[in-house]
Image: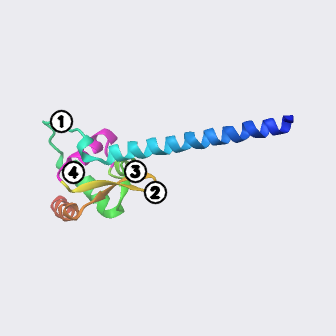
């Protein structure tokens, strides 16, 4: 066996190992995304009471901008990220929003009941 064939054999083995590693990474990432979008895995303090001001900002932003990731939604609604997440979990538990994977990002989307709630709450706050 020549040096060049030994090098090619090692390169081939490395490519195979890299491919297997990438497949494992992709699978692990998909499992993580499924866990993050599963409402059963989301926790909320029992004494949590949502702020009407925060709900109004979130709903108004979602009506205006549509589906967004939580980071962008917190910026657009001018809310602290942690506060926004607590409100999103509350809204998900009420069936007003849901998390969906779009373009490899987890976005928050209004449900049909959420659209009705959003139009009602934005009408009250104006």
Residue at mark 2: 103
Q: Judge the density around disc 1: few (<14), some (14-19), many (≥20) Cα neighbours within 10 Å.
A: few
Q: Position of residue 107 (x, y in %)?
A: 37, 54
State the separation of the CA atoms marked 3 and 1: 24 Å
Residue closer to the observer: 31 or 65? 31
State the separation of the CA atoms marked 2 and 4: 23 Å
Residue at mark 3: 72
Instruction: Name the residue furthest right.
Output: 2
Residue at mark 4: 91
Magenta: main secondary structure equals helix
Of tags 1 and 2, the one toward the viewer is 2
Q: Position of residue 62 (x, y in %)?
A: 31, 59
Of tags 3 and 2, the one toward the viewer is 2
Numbered range of the magenta stretch? 78-94
Of tags 2 and 4, the one toward the viewer is 2
Question: In the image, is residue 5 above or below residue 52?
Answer: above
Residue closer to the observer: 55 or 44? 44
Q: Judge the density around disc 4: few (<14), some (14-19), many (≥20) Cα neighbours within 10 Å.
A: some
Residue at mark 1: 45
Q: Is label 3 in contact with label 1 (beta carbons under 8 Å)? A: no
State the separation of the CA atoms marked 3 and 2: 15 Å
Instruction: First in sequence, mark 2 or 4: give its number.
Output: 4
Q: Position of residue 112 (x, y in %)?
A: 22, 65
Q: Is residue 32 magenta?
A: no
Numbered circle sitting on residue 93:
none
What residue lies at 39% left-to-right and 44% top-to-bottom?
31
Instruction: First in sequence, mark 1 or 2: give its number.
Output: 1
Residue 108's quadrant in the figure? bottom left
State the SS at label 3: helix
Of tags 3 and 4, the one toward the viewer is 4
């Amino acid at each position: 066996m020549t040096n060049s064939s030994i090098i090619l054999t090692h390169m081939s083995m490395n490519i195979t190992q890299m491919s297997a590693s990438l497949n494992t990474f992709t699978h692990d990432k998909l499992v993580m995304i499924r866990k993050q979008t599963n409402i059963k895995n989301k926790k909320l303090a029992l004494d949590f009471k949502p702020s009407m001001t925060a709900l109004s900002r979130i709903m108004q932003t979602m009506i205006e901008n549509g589906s967004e990731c939580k980071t962008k939604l917190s910026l657009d609604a001018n809310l602290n990220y942690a506060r926004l997440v607590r409100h999103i979990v509350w809204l998900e538990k009420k069936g007003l929003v849901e998390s969906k994977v779009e373009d490899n990002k987890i976005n928050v989307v209004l449900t049909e009941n959420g659209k009705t709630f959003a139009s009602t709450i934005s009408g009250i706050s104006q």
